Image (spheres, rainbow, N blue to C red):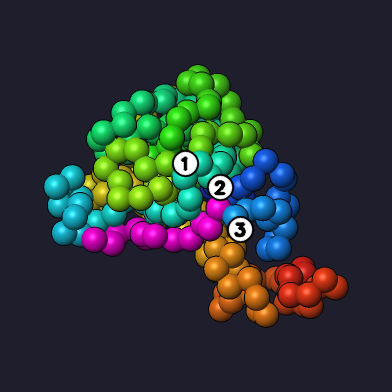
Amino acid sequence: MLNEQELAKYFSFHHLPVKTTDWWDGLPLYYSNLKQYHPSFTQRFGQRPEFYKKYNMKGHNGIDIGYIDGTPVVAPGRLWVTYTQFDDDKGYGNHVFTETPSQYINGDYYKLDVVFGHLKNITCKSAHWLEEGDSVGPGDSTGDSSGPHLHLGLRPWFSKDGSNWTQVFNNNGYFGYVDPEPYFPHIVWDLDEILHPKGFIGTYKPIGYKQVASKGGGYHWEKIK
């Protein structure tokens, strides 16, 4: 059975789960108006174990991306909407559960649950495919939340026949959820650039790219040929 690092190589999202209606090609400084939503990490996986004790978890079972109210939340890749739930007062609030297409790897089948929590409202329908960049809904602070943010959770599943599924990490203390960051290879340095837009791109360097000066000022990444 694949471990978390091996799964991340097969299930890799190259786009952030938040963006504007303008298309983003995956490189920094191509966010159009994304900076106006002030996205940043507000909580990472495993943090605040004392708070999540009430949910019988070892700590936070996803990542939180803080932003201003109404920030567009979108599918970071092709996803099947398994169900949507409107619940302003509890847990994830208004939230959407999706799953990736399954993949046949080394004789077994794998897929991921992807949950989007604390939405203002929901703009997608159950039992429909979302393509990369399709709207899930505007962000908010519904449910058990102290401010507007997206809770993003990933949970791997495993099957021998493609029909009968079990959670890969069912007893890990997070109800089978794993750290999403390895599955989003750009997310750390993308958010770092938004937080440090002047003079330099920040402290994170994507593998295979180099930092060069832009004609209009500032810097951007270019792929090393």
Residue 122 vs 26, above or below: the answer is above
Q: Are marks 1 and 3 in contact (CB under 8 Å)?
A: no
Callout 1, which amino acid? Gly
Locate residue 82 relative to residue 47 in the image: left or right.
right
Q: Are marks 1 and 2 in contact (CB under 8 Å)?
A: yes
The residue that mark 3 highlights is 35
Residue for point 44% across, 54% down: 66
Residue 147 vs 181, above or below: the answer is above
SS type, badge 3: helix
SS type, badge 1: loop
Callout 2, which amino acid? Val
Residue 185 lies, in percent from the top left, at: 56, 60
What residue span does the magenta drawing correspond to? 37-48
The residue that mark 1 highlights is 139
**Marks 2 and 3, how far apart in space?**
11 Å
**Marks 1 and 2, how far apart in space?**
9 Å
SS type, badge 2: loop
